[in-house]
Amino acid sequence: MIFSEIIAIPKDDPVAFTFFTGYMAMMAASVFFFFERGRVDGKWKLSLLISGLITGIAAVHYYYMRDYYMVTGENPTSLRYIDWTLTVPLMCVEFYLLTKYAGAKVSLLWKLIIASVWMLVLGYIGEAYNPEGGSTTHSVVYGFLSTLGYVYILYTAWFGEVAHLAVKSNSGVIKKGVRYLAWFVLVGWAIYPIGYMCMPGGWLNIAFGLGPTNVDLFYNIADAINKIGFGLVVYNIAITESSKNKAVGA
Amino acid sequence: MKKTNFIYWVLFLLLLSLSPILKEIDVDYQNQIALFFILLFGVPHGAIDNLLFFENSAVKPARFYFFYLSAVLVYVLIWLLHPISAFSFFLVLSAYHFGQSQFSEEIGKVKILSALLYLMWGLSVLSSFFFYNHEELVLLFQQHTDTHSINLILSESVIKTSYFTTSLFTVGIFGIYFSKNLIPIEKLAIEILILIIIHLTAYLFTFLLGFAMFFVLIHSFKALQSEFNFFYRKVSSLTLFQFSRQIMPLFLISVLGLSLLVYLTHSGILNLSYPLLFIIATSSITLPHAFVMERFYAIKKTN
């Protein structure tokens, strides 16, 4: 692949634009989280490392996805789901780490990871094995089943174990932070189904004629919001709590 | 976020993922399912009006029932004399009542502004269902001669104007509340999100299915929850089963009464179409119910 071919982003191709922007934003976010890791207390270092890994893994995948898209003009479905299979469970790890000091057990982490894997595997089957030309039944069945995993994570974040532990933590910053993350799951993660429904046979494809390119557009926007935003919320909690501890120590 | 709002969001997402299949299901069948849920969960939230009224009231039960039934009969009379006025008043009353149940527990400090918010929010919600399902409703009301007059109110321009105006007003009132620090930002975000989802529900599903989702989850469940909490505060040993038993007598009377009306219509004794019968029955009950709930929310605020 010649570099000059890659760099030529068509002016009227928002998907290509968001692939490039997404790649740079994820990479910049990783550098930020890794560097800032040195400024926070020991107990928050792992959280920031995870934030950096999430955006770092995504940056590498975006590097490959943008090339794949630019050359073939097709959805990089496999790369996309490989990225998510690594990064979404890591987001669940963030929930666990935030509430760990309020007594979160490893079982919570596993439950969240299983739910996220369920959500992704069924989403992948729905998307990657969609018959030629698109099958509504296939898309709907796997979309519905995948949504159940999302609903479980959403419930845990808003009303379940994570929410209870955040209240138990007695830390205003953690309560607020977990609530912000719950908002990301509620609104930010809800952008993904919009992308999913754009594929052939999907509801938005049938009703509004949105096509496969829109799948990537929605996914890229959602990724940028959720991965970087998620990390920034964790960073904010870590830096605020660390500053507080420094002030008490002084 | 309240659990009722959360359940609504989840149900919306699940039904959204199933929407291509839902569209294949016959509209009549969808309507029957929707009506079943409206009756099953909608009627109970009003089937405790008597007990709500007797709290903090010296009025004797016989007197209460007399006025309650009189209000129902008066409303039926208005329907007979002037259907357009009866239907218009029903819409405004329902809108206010929906808004009141949505906000009265959290937003109620500024009386006039609150009342305006209840009305505008309710109208925005109701008109969204009419606006996005206009064709379906016009066809339905055109099918029966006794519902032709309702179509006059549901003219496209009226519904369109009402939808955009009331939605803008609602957002404007939210803005005033926020600027005066009368509503926390998270609560505001949730309310805006819920309003958007209700509008999307109206847009995505058939009229009755969408309305049933809103009416059951956002309105009835919320009202039932408030009512349960109200009695629970007085008797902390109150269980859900006991609460259901309190609801049961009026619920059964309402269902029997409605079944009787359906039978009378079916056998031709009552010369009404089913849509009009349903609207008259609902509106006639809504009038006294809205009064009881107005008093209930006022009592809750002072307690």
Image: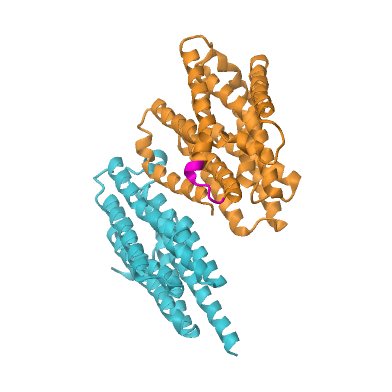
Chain colours: A cyan, B orange
Instruction: Decide if residue A24 is in sight here.
Output: no
- Report the residue at 39% width, 27% height from top: B29
Instruction: Decide if residue B287 is in sight here.
Output: yes
Specify whether residue B238 is painted magenta. Answer: yes
Single out the residue that lies furthest toward the bottom.
A250
Q: Is residue B105 above or below residue A228?
A: above
Q: Is residue A169 above or below residue B183?
A: below
- Report the residue at 64% width, 51% height from top: B106
As drawn, is A55 to the left or to the right of B156?
Answer: left
Q: Is residue B118 above or below residue A226?
A: above
Q: Picture coordinates of residue A88 (x, y %)?
A: 36, 64
Q: Quadrant of the N terminus of chain A?
A: bottom left
As drawn, is A173 to the left or to the right of A147?
Answer: right
Front one among B120 and B251: B251
Q: Picture coordinates of residue B69 (x, y %)?
A: 64, 23
Count of picture labels:
0
Front one among A113 and B130: A113
Q: Picture coordinates of residue A146 (x, y %)?
A: 33, 52
Q: Quadrant of residue A219?
A: bottom left
Q: Which residues are magenta?
A: B236-242
